[in-house]
Image (cartoon, grey):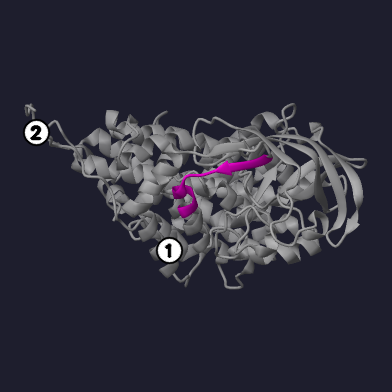
Amino acid sequence: MHQTHDVFNQPAPLVDVNLFEGNLAMRDALKVHAPGLNLRPLEDLGALAGSATMQVHARLANVLGPQLRTHDRQGYRIDEVEFHPSYHILMAAAMKAGLHGSPWLDNTRNAHVLRAAGFMLFTELEPSMLCPISMTYAVTPALRANAAIHQEWSPGLGARAYDPALTLYKHKAGLTMGMGMTEKQGGSDVRANTTRAEPDGHDAWGARYRLTGHKWFFSAPMSDAFLVLAQTANGLSCFFLPRVLPEALSGSTTQGQHNALRIQRLKDKLGNKANASSEVEFEGALAWLVGEEGRGVPQILEMGTMTRLDCALGSSGLMRQALTQAIHHTRQRLAFGKALIEQPLMKNVLADLALESEAATALALRLARTFDQPDDPHEKAMARLLTPVAKFWICKRGAGFAQEAMECLGGNGYVEEGGEGVLARIYREMPVNSIWEGAGNIMALDLLRGLRKADAASALAQELKPALGQHAALDRMARSLPLRVEVMGSEVEARRLAQDVALAVQAALLAQSAPGFVFSAFCESRLGGAWGQTYGSLGSGVDFDAILRRALPA
């Protein structure tokens, strides 16, 4: 072999770093939203999520994705999905960290904020397997409407143990749950669903039905049970559908009999490769009513509210990792005589991305805080207001953010190899949080519905009040928004309202948790008009160096 050249000016990979220790935006936001919080679990999780070992598992789980096995070698129908061992390692780590249902069993203060911060840190791996973790977290508020099932299943749903076996729930160390709403003909219009539910008697879990029909998007089909929608004589209703039937119906006290859920195929998606998203059919599958007949949509949306929180958290975590990779690369890469990060235009781009990331973190954690105080009238109103706003705005900003961060690495960012290859995965993953659990228009319409049901104008005014008098652009926005909220009647303007509410609340939050140079730069660019149409168009008066020092990874 002839040696043609030496390899140099290639940045070292970012491995074995503590993602929490270097995240000042998150640490300062937690001081506001959860003062006195024990940070040790986040420090431990930050070290784990930043480790080279877990980065390898995240890559392998995506590259060597799930495989559907509809039948065994003898020809029996089994409907099972096989995963690479790295997938199971990631699931076990997430559940051990309590990122699933454990906050509902935790009586300590700020349990949901702690879990939210951990979810964001774990998302930085871009492991693509957090969908069942999120749905297991989200199911509890909806499942409470069937007290018998909730009582039997909640200990397993909150257990910090992962058990992938497809067997009877009573014999498992930990349980996971999924959800199935959409069908081929309807998509987001779930009232167009045709899956039908026929009464099949009563038992210890309440009214039992047999479901016949299909679901077009059915994520994590190896979960232990699902909440699904089906039509009864009284309209669309919510049902609990287990993968393995209870022993009274299966005649077995060990493995149990599989329910009549047929996995037709797995989706070939743009991203989210490690997660098995499927198409399924129900052939008289047994399911139990949750809530009232005909009230399926509001019932299952109690679960949807929590998964929408996780969409905002997930996009925020991916933003942070994309920013981290961009900064890490540009600090080491030399171009035109100095490090890329020292080039004026690159400073502008990176500082702009840092502002966006910090604002997303602040808003996502603020939303999580509302679920730690469900009995507080203001927090309840803010949960109703901020859930669609945060889901809409943070997730909508994600894809463009990832593309800009990738461009900071040039061609290296477009290659899916090595540590920096996570940026390509992030870019492919970003759109999913915007699309799933209600795309942009659905979120904007949900905001309008929320404005009609709650005293949103006064709640918003109260939320913005602590930041008044600190920046003229925010003051102007704060004065105009409550009136716009009160008179908003047109769907045509709903997206703009969601955007402006998000920006105003982000600015108010940064006034509490961020240094003045971050707050002022955010207000001048996002609210004051000193901003262009792309990242990297901040005004010359911005303290770029200070913003970048704050955003540096550990």
* Residue 83 is covered by the magenta coloring: yes
Q: Amino acid at mark 2?
A: Asp
Magenta residues span 77-89
Residue at the (52%, 56%) spot, across then down: 365
Left or right side of 154 for 501: left
Q: Quick check: marks 2 and 1 in contact, CB under 8 Å?
A: no
Q: Please identify the residue farthest to the front as the structure is shown.
A: 74
Q: Secondary structure at mark 1?
A: helix
User: In the rendered view, would you say 1 is above or below 540?
Assistant: above
Per the image, the residue denoted by label 1 is: 42
| Quarter placement of the C terminus | bottom left
Q: Amino acid at mark 1?
A: Leu
* Disc sitting over residue 396 in the figure: none
**Of 412 and 400, which appears nearest the observer?**
412
Q: Position of residue 391 (x, y in %)?
A: 58, 43
User: In the rendered view, would you say 117 is above or below 323?
Assistant: below
* Disc sitting over residue 6 in the figure: 2
Quadrant of residue 538 in the image? top left
